[in-house]
Amino acid sequence: MTFTLALDLPSMRKDINAALMQFIQNENKYLSKIGPELDPVANGIEKFLLDSGKRLRPLFAYVGYLATGSLSSVEIIRAISSLELIHACALIHDDVMDGSDTRRGAPSIHKLFEALHSKDNLQGSSSKFGVASAILMGDLALVWSAQMLHTSGIKNDELITVLPFYDEMRVELMAGQYLDVFEQSLATQSVERSLKVARYKSGKYTIERPLHFGGSLGGASKELLEAFTNYGIPLGEAFQLRDDLLGVFGDPTETGKPSGDDLREGKRTALIAITMDRADTSQLKYLSKYFGDPNLSSEQIGHIQEIIVNTGAQSHIESMIEQLAQRSLSTLAFDGISPVGKDLLTQLVHISTIRKI
């Protein structure tokens, strides 16, 4: 595997992909030695991880490292690439919890293994087999993340420095996932609670903690880590708000998910909370009847989308995204960020918030 070590985002993503491919293929050889029964696991997780993905978490970690003025290395790339495996764990488990049939335009892991069970005429419930397999594969991705970090080749003092941020990132992700599940169970609407879910489920572990992870590897000062927080928290919230809009209005060819999937799942996002707060009696009655119905027709989804637009909730969220993005950009005036770091962090604001609907 060759690494470019170039400092533009496409080349950085290419290096991250090379590190992931090298690690996954080596670990899949070990799985194959255990037995051929694990071949579907090896193939499934390799395809899930390597076929697509923006690599935002490793990219933010990489930029956090470069922002300290440090020079890149293959060992650093391997270390920061381990964060993508945490994301893989989150996606696999999230699809199980949400009952999502697709991910990135392909069957989700639990559906893939459900189909495998049916195809091979195995005993028991195909759906239970699929769910159990996905839970274990998500756990495997989390274990592999730690393994990839520990075997990356970084120095012992670098590993010791980065571990607190790595651990904090994983804890906050799991806390955010629970908050998301709990929010759906409350079946109420609260912009404040929805933003808290967005902060922990997505924002902190997508942007702030990866920046801390990379920055600590580069010996970042306390002031620089604080600047990363001031940049990462608002941008993380903007990132999740954009994701909420995509979950309702997104083009399936871009998102890899059916149109209006979040409406079928009854996702209690800030977008929905604002919609319900502003809805009139007839709109609220329609939302109460159909929001969260897994069998929503395309016509019903279209009507809910109209309600969201007509209440002004969509434009309000767009305005919030813009304001949060500007807050992030304003922190880049801090002198402790290297010039290359400032340039890349500016680009990442655009990538994180201006995604197609």
Image: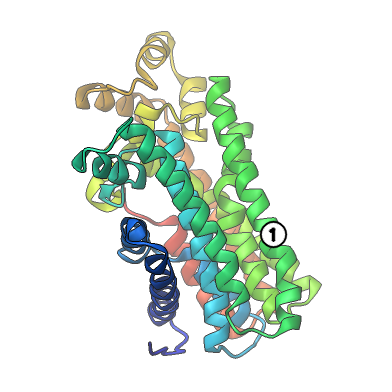
Q: Identify which residue is drawn at 53% across, 45% down.
A: 320
Q: Position of residue 171 (x, y in %)?
A: 67, 51
Question: What's the coloring here?
Answer: rainbow
Q: Is residue 243 visible?
A: no
Towards the viewer: 12 or 141? 141
For this view, does 116 lie left or right of residue 82?
Answer: left
Q: Identify which residue is drawn at 56% across, 35% down.
A: 180
For this view, does 173 lie left or right of residue 59?
Answer: right
Q: Position of residue 166 (x, y in %)?
A: 66, 63
Query: In the figure, 55 relative to 261: above or below?
Result: below
Query: In the figure, 336 relative to 120: above or below?
Result: below
| Mark 1 crowd level (few <14, some 14–19, many ≥20, 10 Å Cα) | few
For this view, does 242 lie left or right of residue 357?
Answer: right
Q: Identify which residue is drawn at 56% across, 88% down.
A: 72
Image quadrant in which the N terminus is located = bottom left
Q: Quadrant of residue 175?
A: top right
Q: Is residue 246 visible?
A: yes
The residue singled out by tag 1 in the image is: 167
